[in-house]
Image (cartoon, rainbow, N blue to C red):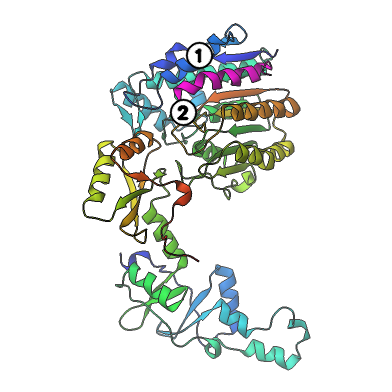
Amino acid sequence: MRRTGFLYDERFLLHDTGPEHPECPARLLAIYRGLEEAGLISKVRPIKARRADQQWIEIVHSIKLIMRFEEACQWGMSELDHPDNKICGKTFETAMLAVGGILDTVDLMMEGEIDNAFCAVRPPGHHAEVNRVMGFCFFNNIAIAARYLRRKWKLQRIGIVDFDVHHGNGTQNIFEDDPAVFYYSIHEHPSFSYPGTGREFERGSGEGYGFTLNSPVLPGGGDAEYKALFEKDLFPAFGEFKPEVILVSAGFDAHVDDDMSDIKLSTGCFSWIMKNIAGMAGKYSGGRVISVLEGGYAVDRLSELARNHVEILLGIKA
Amino acid sequence: MFINKSMTRRVITIGPEAAVLEARRKMDDNGIRHLPVVDEHNKVVGIITDRDVRSALPSVFSACKQAPEKIQQISDLKVGDIMNKKVITISPMDTLEDALLLMQKSNKGALPVVDRDGELKGIISTPDLIRAFINVLGIKEPGTLLCIVVEDKLGQMKKIVDAITEEGIPFGSILVARHWEKGKRAVFPYLLTVNVSKLKRKLENMGYTLLNPMEWSLDQTRKN
């Protein structure tokens, strides 16, 4: 059994998005319950959140954005820049805790205390750009983790796999011209889904050209299309890139029962994806994988999806 | 939407006395396919396209076999010899709609924009129209497209717009496909949000059909 970290903190529930918002605290409760019921809480190494040092947020986001976000929460505003991005008095602190917890998780893995980890955090991050919050995302958790691995741990090659059903425009945008961070995303085709980026011809820019790769999937697509695209696009790309760490933007909203998209993945296909990511990590990155929660709004499915996800990281799933 | 708001103002032009080889160089250097030909008063006297240039010059397959006098002939060839003198132009105060219809009718990829005195003011070409269309669709802003099939009768659009507005969702654009099955229209609202699940359920409860994205089309009557 591998040593898997599990970042979870009840304070992640304090980001209150109001009634009827899909990105709700119940998502995390479902994930925790799923692990608990399967007896996994005693098998993982629990990690609690810690408030991030703001200097690490600034390696990705502008100080202006950080200040605006903090002030909007303090002033009691109910949204930031757009009705999608609901906030409450605690949202800024929750986002700081999520980032801090993820960076602690990175340190634990790089120090050899754990092999891999799943970070069940809120709010999600992959839509957030340097100077723009959008699509329920405020700080780009995965991008901050990638840059932290570069700055603090001096890694040369970080591979990001984003299987949230929406394209991670923020992450792509942040690393577009950076050949040290390979961003791969599979998502519903942008002509039919938010945010409208992540087309096949978006391959990065400047020195980073070729280190961005997108696999758009047409509406109605499911397991067969996903598996074929992973095999055609991601596996050869990472085989050549050989990431030293793999970061996963784990969104579960491509599930057939999730009404945020027209993609119809089975529960089993999420396991197939994660097994293959863990397999690539075993081959290229000494098993080092950190998976960070993005979307996934079918609360009734999240318990099982999270349980499978963690069992694969632990290496105990049949 | 007037042409002078969307046209390219810095037009690359050429004179009728210039060599055809010079016209080819100008097109290659600037990545363009049309050169308005102007006289010394900046009046349009013709237009030359990359196709005109290619037809006038020998192909790469035969170039090396040309006799010296033939090569001389080619380098002496002037823009005025091969340009199209019947130029279809448009005025700065014509509209984008005029340009779209005129380009469709005349099958031209670019129209020089000239004022009443025939002086060249700009050019409107396919890239300008692509930019305008991207703008109209609003697709540079993050959002989600839906397709709602409605009865072709008065007041349908109001109900849809009201339903979306009640949810506090901002609009990027709304397209309507006119040529749908008889008595129906397809309405495509581009919504500036990731959060459409609740709205989709609401529209369905109101009795609207949300069309399967794989069947979306702006023009269902077009068969080829």
Query: Disc 1 to disc 2, how far (Cα)?
Result: 23 Å
Q: Is residue B212 left or right of residue A78?
A: right
Q: Which mark is residue A32?
A: 1
Residue B2 quadrant:
bottom left
Task: State the residue lying farthest toward the left.
Answer: B155
Instruction: Please check the rendered image and state whether residue B66 is part of the magenta-colored stretch, yes or no.
Output: no
Lower sequence index among marks 1 and 2: 1
Task: State the residue lying farthest toward the front.
Answer: B182
- Magenta range is A295-318
Task: State the residue lying farthest toward the bottom.
Answer: B69
Nearer the observer, A63 or B130: B130
Q: Are marks 1 and 2 on the same chain?
A: yes
Q: Is residue A150 visible?
A: no
Q: Residues within 10 Å of mark 2 (few under 14, many from 20)?
A: many
Q: Is residue B216 above or below residue A247?
A: below
Q: Which residue is mark 2?
A: A139
Disc 2 residue type? Phe
Label 1 marks a residue whose chain is: A
